[in-house]
Image (cartoon, rainbow, N blue to C red):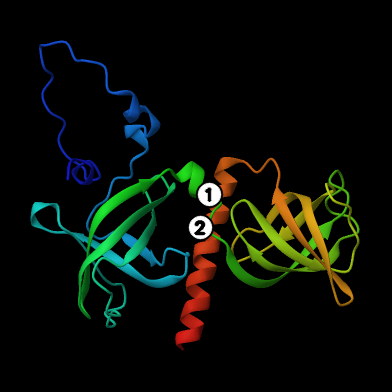
C-alpha cells in the first residue's frame, strides 16, 4: 500500500528537525523521481502481459486510493478474471512514457478495479513494445546522404528500439542505413539510423531485423507515442 500511495500527488510532509537516516540500498534501484504521477482523467492503455492492447480507458482514483479504469468511449468493457495480470501504459505530463504491472481485483462492464501495482522503469521498458505495422517506408543506404537514392521498403513491425523491415536491397550484418517513415498521417516523419542485426530471405525480398542507433531520447519518446497512436488506429479499424 505504501508504494501505491506514492504514485499519487500529495502535499509533502513538513520537514523533521531530526536528522534523517539514509534510505535502504534496495530503494536506490528505483529512484523516487521516476515513479509516474497518476491522476483522475488520465488516459491509460490496458494490455495483456504479452503487450496485446485490450482497451483504452480512463483512470479514476477513488476514495482511499482505490484505482479504477473506465471505458474511454463509454462502451462496455470485457469481463476480466479475478487476479488477471495486466499492464497499464500511459504518458506523464512531461510526455515521458511509463508502464505499470497490476492485477484485476474486480471487473464489470463499467469499470475494472486494479491492485498490486508494480512500476516498470520506463528507460528499461520503452523499447519493449513491438507493434505490427505493415507500413510503407524508404531507406537511404548512405547514412551521410540521406536524401539521395532512396529505396522503397515495408516496415513489418516496429518498437522504440528497432524494426523488422522487408525490402529487395541486400545489406550485410552490421550495415548501417537510414529509415524514413511516417507512421501516423499528418505527423512529422522519422529518419532513423538502423543497424542490421539479422537477415532472412522471404521470396524475392529480404527481411531484416534492425536496431535503431543513436536515436535521441526525445525522438524515441515521440516514436513511442506514434506507435501507441498507430496501435489504437489499428484496433479501432478492426472494431469498425
| Mark number displayed over residue 101 | none
| Mark number displayed over residue 221 | 1
Residue name at image x 28 percent, y 79 percent: 77
**Residue bearing mark 2:** 225
Residue 203: x %, y % from top left: 86, 77
Crowd rating for badge 2 (residues with CA inside 10 Å; few <14, some 14–19, many 20+) = some
Residue in the foreground of this view, choosing between 98 and 196? 196
Q: Is residue 184 visible?
A: no
**How many marks overall?**
2
Crowd rating for badge 1 (residues with CA inside 10 Å; few <14, some 14–19, many 20+) = some
Residue name at image x 90 percent, y 64 percent: 169
Residue in the foreground of this view, choosing between 230 and 21? 21
Residue name at image x 51 percent, y 83 percent: 237
Label 2 element class:
helix
Seen in the picture, residue 32 relative to 52 is either above or below; the reply is: above
Relative placement, left or right, of 95 versus 204 is left
Distance of label 2 from label 1 (alpha carbons): 6 Å
Relative placement, left or right, of 221 versus 85 is right
The answer to whether the residue labelled 2 contacts the one labelled 1, judged by CB atoms less than 8 Å apart, is yes
Residue name at image x 33 percent, y 45 percent: 36
Seen in the picture, residue 216 relative to 187 is either above or below; the reply is: above
Name the quarter where the N terminus is drawn: top left
Residue 149: x %, y % from top left: 91, 59
Q: Quadrant of residue 171?
A: bottom right
Residue 55: x %, y % from top left: 37, 73
Q: Furthest residue to the bottom?
A: 240
Residue 145: x %, y % from top left: 87, 47
Relative placement, left or right, of 224 versus 152 is left
Q: Is residue 183 visible?
A: yes
Amino acid at each position: 500500500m505504501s508504494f501505491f500511495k506514492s504514485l499519487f500527488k500529495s502535499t509533502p510532509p513538513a520537514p523533521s528537525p531530526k536528522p534523517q537516516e539514509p534510505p535502504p540500498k534496495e530503494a536506490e534501484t528505483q529512484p523516487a523521481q521516476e515513479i509516474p504521477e497518476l491522476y483522475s482523467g488520465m488516459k491509460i492503455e490496458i494490455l495483456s502481459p504479452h503487450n496485446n492492447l485490450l482497451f483504452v480507458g480512463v483512470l479514476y482514483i477513488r476514495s482511499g486510493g482505490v484505482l479504477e479504469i473506465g471505458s474511454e468511449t463509454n462502451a462496455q468493457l470485457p469481463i476480466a478474471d479475478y487476479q488477471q495480470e495486466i499492464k497499464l501504459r500511459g504518458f506523464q505530463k512531461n510526455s515521458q512514457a511509463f508502464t505499470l504491472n497490476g492485477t484485476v481485483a474486480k471487473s464489470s462492464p463499467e469499470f475494472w478495479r486494479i491492485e498490486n501495482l508494480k512500476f516498470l522503469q520506463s528507460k528499461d521498458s520503452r523499447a519493449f513494445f513491438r507493434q505490427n505495422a505493415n507500413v510503407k517506408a524508404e531507406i537511404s543506404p548512405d547514412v551521410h546522404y540521406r536524401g539521395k537514392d532512396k529505396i522503397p521498403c515495408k516496415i513489418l513491425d516496429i518498437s522504440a528500439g528497432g524494426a523488422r523491415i522487408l525490402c529487395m536491397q541486400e545489406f550485410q550484418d552490421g550495415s548501417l542505413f537510414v529509415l524514413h517513415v511516417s507512421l501516423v498521417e499528418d505527423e512529422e516523419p522519422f529518419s532513423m539510423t538502423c543497424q542490421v542485426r539479422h537477415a532472412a530471405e522471404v521470396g524475392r525480398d529480404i527481411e531484416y531485423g534492425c536496431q535503431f542507433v543513436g536515436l535521441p531520447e526525445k525522438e524515441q519518446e515521440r516514436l513511442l507515442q506514434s506507435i501507441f497512436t498507430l496501435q489504437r488506429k489499428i484496433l479501432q479499424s478492426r472494431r469498425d
